[in-house]
Image (cartoon, rainbow, N blue to C red):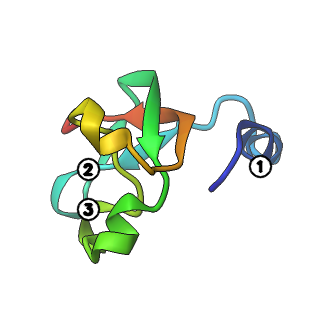
Amino acid sequence: MTTVAQLVAALREFPPQTPVLVRGYAGGLDDVREIERTAVMVDYNKHQGFVYFGDHREPNEPTELIGQEIVEAISLKGEGD
């Protein structure tokens, strides 16, 4: 998992005016519309075999939290999210 410190260090390599984009629907790119703090279940989808949804998942129900590694994370969202 990339940390804020790693992301900041990587972003320092670019000129300040460089746009930041996220993957959009069907291979397009979107502007970042929201930077959100969220809780995620680490590697939940990977362990369930749902990797096409991404490795991690936000919990839908409190019961899903039992036995799961939960971390606070930053989510960059585009228009399609």
Kind of residue at badge 3: Phe
**Residue identifier under label 3:** 53
Please tell me how crowded label 3 is: few (under 14), some (14-19), or many (20+) other residues with Cα within 10 Å. Answer: few
Assign a secondary structure to mark 2. Answer: loop
| Callout in the foreground (3, 1) | 3
Q: In the rendered structure, find residue 26 and report the number of the disc placed on it.
A: none
Residue 17: image location, x then y, percent: 65, 29
Q: In the rendered structure, find residue 24 and report the number of the disc placed on it.
A: 2
Which residue in the rendered view is the most extreme toward the bottom?
Answer: 49
**Residue identifier under label 1:** 10
Where, by quadrant of the figure, is residue 7 drawn?
top right
Residue that appears at 72% across and 30% down? 16
Q: Earlier in the sequence, mark 2 or mark 3?
A: 2
Distance of mark 2 from mark 1, alpha carbons?
22 Å
Where, by quadrant of the figure, is residue 60 drawn?
top left
Q: Tell me: residue 27, above or below residue 12.
A: below
Quadrant of the image containing the C terminus: top left
Q: Earlier in the sequence, mark 2 or mark 1?
A: 1
Q: Nearest the camera: 76 or 29?
A: 76
In the displayed structure image, the side of residue 17 where residue 68 appears, left or right: left
Q: Earlier in the sequence, mark 3 or mark 1?
A: 1
Kind of residue at badge 2: Gly
Residue that appears at 62% across and 37% down? 18
